[in-house]
Amino acid sequence: MQKERTLVLIKPDGVQRALIGEIVQRFEKVGLKLVAMKMMVADAKHVEEHYTLDPEWRRITGEKTIKSYKEKGLPPPSEDPLEITAVILKNLMKYMTAGPVVAMVWEGAHAVKIVRKLVGGTEPLTSDVGTIRGDYVLDSYQLSDTGKRSVRNLVHASGSVPEAENEIKHWFDKKDLIDYHLVQEQILYDVNLDGVLE
């Protein structure tokens, strides 16, 4: 469990707003360990492959979008989930290739769930105060839909352990992942806190 890993991407808006250090600090402060990091400009093919690693992503995302529109009392742009997702994917590819992204792999107990909790919900408007998206972004689905663009929400975080494993392989070679020890791991994981006192 201590070795669980998850992928985090700081999206182009997070880089442009000079929030890299702030975002990294949130994960470090909770006790996660950074095991890989790189800055790159992703191409559209790489971004499309990232979002479609799960063959069900198109259908699930489209269905969730339709449901979200209806829950808000709004008519969805289409009743066809795949038609909706085609637009979402096109907007995501434009957004994620607009500038550099910072790709990171974080390791620690419950890494996937901890990172998702710190990041907050996908829509910044409804993300809780104290989360990265809730504290640093004022965007909403309504604004992004009006602008015919992706919601600008600073970061991507893997949604499950299997998803994290697939996404990490997509963004990093195995040799890029560094196994090492941090002194703080003894405090976080050692049952008896052995070695604290001299």
Image (spheres, rainbow, N blue to C red):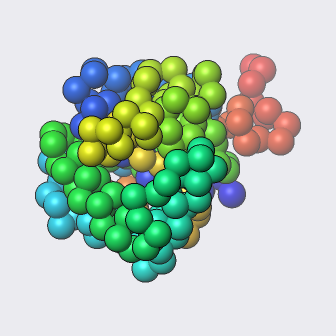
Q: Position of residue 120 (x, y in %)?
A: 57, 37
- Count up the numbered dots: 0
Residue 138 can be seen in this image: yes
Q: Please state if 157 lies on the left or on the right of 160 as rendered.
A: left
- Vertical placement of residue 114 versus 57, above or below: above
Q: Residue at x 76, y 41 (%)?
A: 190
Q: Please state if 190 lies on the left or on the right of 151 as rendered.
A: right
Q: Position of residue 94 (x, y in %)?
A: 19, 50
Q: Residue at x 83, y 42 (%)?
A: 191
Q: Based on the displayed image, in which of its 4 quarters is residue 44 positioned?
A: bottom left
Q: In the displayed orientation, state which residue is furthest to the right.
A: 192
* The C terminus sits in image quarter: top right
Q: Please state if 118 lies on the left or on the right of 169 as rendered.
A: right
* The N terminus sits in image quarter: bottom right
Q: Based on the displayed image, in which of its 4 quarters is residue 146 positioned?
A: top left
47 and 35: which is toward the camera: 47
Residue 57 can be seen in this image: no
Q: Position of residue 118 (x, y in %)?
A: 58, 34
